[in-house]
Amino acid sequence: LGKINDLLDPRCNANLNQRVEYYLDANNIDPGWLQIKKLISSNASIDLDLPFIKERKRKDACPSGRMYELTDTGRAMAKRLKLYARTLVESGPLRQLPDTTVDEEFGMVTMSMDFREGGGGGKSLHRYCDELDSRGVPYVVRELKVADYIFFIGDKLAPILIERKTAEDVASSLHDGRWERQQRNMRKAQFVLGGGPARRCQICYIIEGDPSKRTVHGGNVGRRNWSQSVDDVENAIGTLPSLGFSVMRSKGHLHTVTILARIVSDVSWRANNRSIDAHFNYAQFMTRVKHVSEEMGDPPSDPQHQNPAPPIVVENRRTAASSSHASTSAAASSGIDAASRDKSDADDDDDIEMEGSAKNSTFDEGAARAQLEHNEAAAELRKLSIAALKERCKERDEKISGKKDDLIARLLKPRKPEILILRARRKLYVPRVPSSNAAIMVALVLHHTPGSQGITKERLMVLAEETGVSKESMSGDGGSFYDGWSGVKQLLDGDPALVRKEKGFRYSLTTQPPNMCGIAVAKALHKLAHQEGLCSTPPAD
């Protein structure tokens, strides 16, 4: 412990200055000591499955009886770190990666992340670093004066500034006044990076989490004494576009890191195509920001600087699916009158000369025919009793609760894959879509080859988040100990099980028996996710 403290920067907030007994307590969660535990674990070295440090128990060697030594992997890493530590590096394109190479996808782009992100090193900063490591994103942790994330092309700043806030962060910022101060500073920085009045710099908020799920007693978000209701928080977020900011919504920290990785990749692509301007290094940028007049931080009055597009498109597949379901329900509830009206409209449309290509005309006719058939089916179902509709829903493994319109809407949807219906009839476990377990299975069927080594939990959580099949964030909502991995035991149980756990805490889909194995169920869940509008990856044939 003494040798570690001698090497730490005096400004470091993780000095190991307690008595030895404090750190040897099994329930100790000191953030500095947890870094030691992380180096001992097999997940310390990404993709190598080897620890950096080995712990040995030798009672006669020292009072604590604990000794530590570097593994071969750890010694090689330590030598590289010792070499890097010889020079001090300012905020810039330092590659903070567990490897010496950078994926072509990211080119010469490096993301700089503020050291206070996630509550800093004493809280959740390491989680963001772990996820960036797992994706191979080049990044560095530094103290940033403006924004939480900035992007370097070489040693020059790209014109993109990202501020990340959880729902609680928004409530806290509204309470203490940081909300407006940070926005003013961001707009001043935009003026510098965006070439002056043209403001060709994207300033964006990533809003992480659902405010309605982060309320405390009294209905306020975060803390009661902040006096910020869910409506207050949502209204503040809703005004951001008119104040010159784009907004991207994230389900949790895994989703946030996915968004950031896509932005780094997009900046790299734009840099290679010379479609992005980067003129200042960090020191030049901060010098210019300090000399910008305060009025440059005012909210924009020019409409062309309001309601900007975000750096990338973040698709909310769940919202799209809900909208589609709502449309189906509306069509079902309109009954025979709607069918007749649509049929009449279709007949009238036949008399109107269609403009455009023959291909578009054929497509329009097909869509009109499909809509007509849909309405006719709704009209036929409306003639049935509620009992008959429930019986049909039960046969298709659909819910049988709700009003008549709800039952009809479920019957108008495409039929579930037969293997899922058959498992439900046999009282076997079937993951719901959307759900975390369904996302895990879809991720396995998309990214694992049968017969090869399984996927680690950490990597699998990331891949499951990217599928969009989970209703909530795989990382949880931040308010409880439960996350997307909490229900995985249901996948590992059963005869046959859907997922098997391999040596080294790796996971893969079962392959036997062919008609009820994990792979067959996962493919069916993937198909169902597409039917529900939840997944962007094409299903296998």
Image (spheres, rainbow, N blue to C red):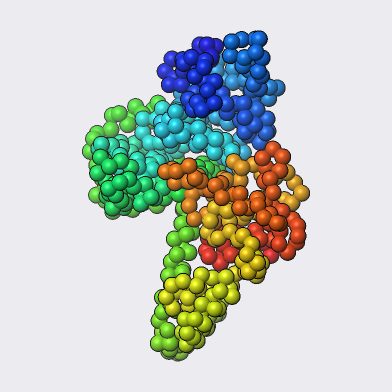
Image quadrant for the C terminus? bottom right
Left or right of 249, for residue 196:
left
Give me the residue at 54% from left, 47% from top. 486
Which corner quadrant of the image does residue 183 belong to? top left
Q: Residue furthest left?
A: 295
Give me the residue at 59% from left, 49% from top. 488
In the image, residue 193 sits, relative to residue 516, either above or below, namely above
Residue 420 appears in the figure: no
Question: Of residues 439 and 100, which is closer to you in this image?
Answer: 439
Give me the residue at 36% from left, 33% from top. 146
In the image, residue 237 sits, relative to residue 292, either above or below, namely below
Left or right of 233, for residue 107:
right
Give me the residue at 52% from left, 20% from top. 23
Question: Of residues 276 and 219, which is closer to you in this image?
Answer: 219
Residue 504 appears in the figure: yes
Image position, residue 538 (x, y; %): 61, 60
Question: Of residues 387 and 381, which is closer to you in this image?
Answer: 387
How many marks do you count on the picture?
A: 0
Image position, residue 187 (x, y; %): 31, 40
Image position, residue 248 (x, y; %): 41, 49
Image position, residue 469 (x, y; %): 54, 56
In the image, residue 425 sits, relative to residue 289, either above or below, namely below
Question: Of residues 284 and 34, which is closer to you in this image?
Answer: 34
